[in-house]
């Protein structure tokens, strides 16, 4: 499991540029599912055929990042955000482009108050001496992602892009275990979640499932003096009640709780104040699709070092497997 | 040039979101002889269909007919009109502007206290649109009510002016540039089916494009727009969104969309091959119908080509005519070269994806 997580987390794939992740995943699932296809949005849809209910399991392939908007004559890059990037957190971070070019994010130092640092006052230094030199490595419109190793320590995983490669890894692992069921299971790896839950919308429209789950990360309330939230790392996968984008369908939530109880899998209930998931765009697709989610409790979401508990991840695979069989 | 004449005429017409009929009527009269079929849907979109000479993807071209404006919300006892903005207009832009109200185009002006009478706070403080009213010269409520009704649409009353170095100053360039360009594009026939969609209510949330794309179910969509431009001396180069006269602007990403990389590359290739100037929009602000159309159905490959417009969303936006002419050229050449770019519609080989090489589906 750790190897799958590491491989996926370290694959380049900011929103709109998920092809490498899609290729990696389709390589992992080739021969293990009945059909692999993509749609115009780049979603990767892997189908295990069956005669029962159509179940859509969605995890998004894209990660947050930056996009180059301008290269100045000295070779510094100006940029915009892809997905939610808190300005103070990205200062001093390393970023890497698809071609391996590494850059450092810094800011215009003549600023009065660090609170006023915006992305517009920041730049990326790739060590180029001039615009021409920079343009040999990077051009306007190119995207970059955080640099951040994937390590395991004390039963936790620390890595960049846990959001949502952890969800992708859980779907891959579940598909590899090939749960015995008559249901038709769609393992869907979606695009452009971080910029507005976009890929899941077209994927769901193409599938029109009977019910759907988003497998993603959620915040926790277990670090010093943080915002209160009744979810903690290691407490089991979180069954979604609600986030900013969706109120989980009670039926879906109940099925998940029942599955967890049946198999004695620890679980928590998630009510996330901020942040949305693919379930938000799936549940209002076409005539409406009962949707819910399994979330992996995650600290430091959208930082270059996000942290999850490996037990929660393994239990999520068990829960998902049981869910697919039992509904 | 015919397209420029059309643009000026279109700019002079009023088509505030939700009330696009005058613009639609003009467009229809100018395209109906060139298309094979057309219909006006329930939301007011004009959708035209032009059959292709061969096989290929279904291509949707989008230009929105609506412009930002105001709506009358109340008639005061003094016969002045309170209003709401329709679409994004900054409060400061409103002061002292001439307007036309309702179907009859009743003239009015958005009044303000003269500088002589303002106290210091009023002079230096922000403008609050809640305190602004439209003066139609009525002596009382009764006289005002005889001319306008609550709910009437208000448009800026400014005629287009040619000026300066090949520039045009006009209201509603966003997105009459797209409408005028699309009329021009529809005069030619291409290898594949084209749906030219003149959409409604873009400025209040990309609404018309949603229903239009659902009817068309396109494979590819190209959005023709007027976009933000700020290239004046008080801004640093990296803050400039686009630059006037430097060619049509291609969006890579904005708040509504990350465009399809293959389609964008195709457009850039076409521009280079035909020596058509182009620029990338450098900021990721704003949104276009591309965002709405992309997530239609099972997904659409989208791109946006736009004319840079200084002072956009004001009665006096400014564009360079060459940008407009080059947008039309670039869009036409893009369409003509599309059949060769097979990877955009499933027949060509892509170097990356095995499952795409096999026609999108891989059975294993």
Image (cartoon, rainbow, N blue to C red):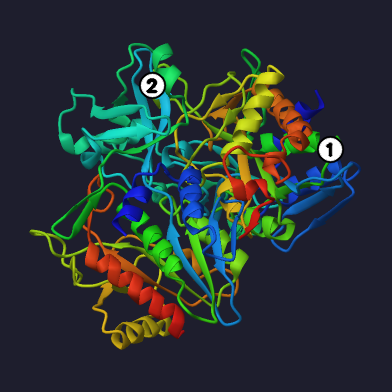
Indicate the quadrant containing the N terminus of chain A: top left, top right, bottom left or bottom right: bottom left
Q: Secondary structure at mark 2?
A: loop
Q: Quadrant of residue A85?
A: top left
Q: CA distance from mark 1 to mark 2?
A: 42 Å
Seen from the viewer's position, the closer of residues A4 and B151 is A4
Seen from the viewer's position, the closer of residues B107 and B358 is B358
Camera-near label (1 vs 2) is: 1
Q: Quadrant of residue A267?
A: bottom left
Q: Is residue A210 left or right of residue A1?
A: right
Asked whether the residues under the numbered discs 1 and 2 touch, taking CB atoms below 8 Å apart as contact, a structural biologist would say no
Residue A271: in sight, yes or no? no
Q: Is residue B319 positioned above or below A55 on the image?
A: above
Name of the residue lying farthest toward the left: A224
Residue A132: in sight, yes or no? yes
Q: Is residue B115 left or right of residue B315?
A: left
Residue A147 location, x and y as percent? 28, 38
How busy is the neighbourhood of tag 1: few (under 14 within 10 Å), some, or many (20 plus)?
A: many
N-terminal-most mark, 1 or 2: 1
How busy is the neighbourhood of tag 2: few (under 14 within 10 Å), some, or many (20 plus)?
A: few
Residue B29 location, x and y as percent? 86, 44
Q: Which residue is at 65% across, 56% downward?
A: B361
Q: Which residue is at 43% across, 52% downward?
A: A61
Residue A169 location, x and y as percent? 37, 59
Seen from the viewer's position, the closer of residues A43 and B294 is A43
Q: Is residue B334 positioned above or below B209 on the image?
A: above
Q: Secondary structure at mark 1?
A: loop
Q: Which residue, given by chain and number where applicable, does mark 1 sit on? A: B190
Chain letter of the residue beneath label 1 in the structure image: B
Seen from the viewer's position, the closer of residues B240 and B291 is B291
Chain letter of the residue beneath label 2 in the structure image: B
Which numbered disc covers residue B235? 2
Name of the residue lying farthest toward the front: A31
């Amino acid at each position: 499991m750790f190897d799958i997580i590491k491989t996926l987390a370290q694959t380049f794939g900011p929103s709109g540029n998920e092809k490498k992740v899609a290729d990696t995943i389709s390589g992992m699932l080739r021969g293990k599912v009945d059909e692999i296809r993509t749609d115009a949005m780049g979603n990767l849809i892997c189908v295990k055929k069956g005669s029962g209910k159509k179940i859509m399991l969605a995890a998004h392939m894209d990660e947050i990042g930056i996009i180059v908007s301008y290269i100045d004559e000295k070779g510094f890059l100006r940029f915009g955000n892809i997905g939610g990037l808190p300005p103070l957190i990205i200062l001093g971070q390393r970023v890497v482009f698809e071609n391996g070019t590494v850059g450092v994010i810094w800011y215009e130092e003549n600023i009065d108050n660090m609170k006023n640092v915006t992305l517009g006052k920041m730049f990326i230094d790739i060590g180029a001496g001039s615009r021409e030199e920079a343009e040999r490595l990077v051009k306007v419109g190119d995207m970059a992602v955080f640099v951040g190793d994937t390590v395991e320590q004390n039963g936790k995983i620390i890595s960049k892009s846990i959001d949502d490669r952890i969800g992708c890894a859980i779907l891959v692992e579940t598909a590899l275990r090939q749960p015995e069921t008559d249901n038709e299971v769609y393992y869907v790896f979606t695009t452009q979640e971080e910029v507005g839950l976009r890929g899941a919308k077209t994927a769901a429209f193409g599938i029109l499932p009977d019910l759907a789950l988003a497998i993603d990360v959620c915040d926790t309330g277990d670090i010093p003096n943080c915002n209160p939230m009744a979810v903690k790392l290691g407490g089991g996968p979180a069954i979604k009640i609600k986030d900013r984008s969706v109120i989980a369908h009670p039926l879906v939530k109940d099925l998940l709780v029942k599955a967890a109880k049946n198999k004695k899998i620890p679980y928590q209930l998630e009510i996330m104040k901020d942040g949305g998931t693919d379930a938000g765009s799936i549940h209002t697709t076409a005539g409406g699709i009962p949707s819910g989610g399994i979330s992996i409790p995650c600290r430091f979401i959208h930082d270059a070092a996000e942290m999850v508990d490996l037990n929660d991840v393994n239990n999520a695979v068990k829960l998902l497997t049981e869910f697919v069989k039992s509904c | 040039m015919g397209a420029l004449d059309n643009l000026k005429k279109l700019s002079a017409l009023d088509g505030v979101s939700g009330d696009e009929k005058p613009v639609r009527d003009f467009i229809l009269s100018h395209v109906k002889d060139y298309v094979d079929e057309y219909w006006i849907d329930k939301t007011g979109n004009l959708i035209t269909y032009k059959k292709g000479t061969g096989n290929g993807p279904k291509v949707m071209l989008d230009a929105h007919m609506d412009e930002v404006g105001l709506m009358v919300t109340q008639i005061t006892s003094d016969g002045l009109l309170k209003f709401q903005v329709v679409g994004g207009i900054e409060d400061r832009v409103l002061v002292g502007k001439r307007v036309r109200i309702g179907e009859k185009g009743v003239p009015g002006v958005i009044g303000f206290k003269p500088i002589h009478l303002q106290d210091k706070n009023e002079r230096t403080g922000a403008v609050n649109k809640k305190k602004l009213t439209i003066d139609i010269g009525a002596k009382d409520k009764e006289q005002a009510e005889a001319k306008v009704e609550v709910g009437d649409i208000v448009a800026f009353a400014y005629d287009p002016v040619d000026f300066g170095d090949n520039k045009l100053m006009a209201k509603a360039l966003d997105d009459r540039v797209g409408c005028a360009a699309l009329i021009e594009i529809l005069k030619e026939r291409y290898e594949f089916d084209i749906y030219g969609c003149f959409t409604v209510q873009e400025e209040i949330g990309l609404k018309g494009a949603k229903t239009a794309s659902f009817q068309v179910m396109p494979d590819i969509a190209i959005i023709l727009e007027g976009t933000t431009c700020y290239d004046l001396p008080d801004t640093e180069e990296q803050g400039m969104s686009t630059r006037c006269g430097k060619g049509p602007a291609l969006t890579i990403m904005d708040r509504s969309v990350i465009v399809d990389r293959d389609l964008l590359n195709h457009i850039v290739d076409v521009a280079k091959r035909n020596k058509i100037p182009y620029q990338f929009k450098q900021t990721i602000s704003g949104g276009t119908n591309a965002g709405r159309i992309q997530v239609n159905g099972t997904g659409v490959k989208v791109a946006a080509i736009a004319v840079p417009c200084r002072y956009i969303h004001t009665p006096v936006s400014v564009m360079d005519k060459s940008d407009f002419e080059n947008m039309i050229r670039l869009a036409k050449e893009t369409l003509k070269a599309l059949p060769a770019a097979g990877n955009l519609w499933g027949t060509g080989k892509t170097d990356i994806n095995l499952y795409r090489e096999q026609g999108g589906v891989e059975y294993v």
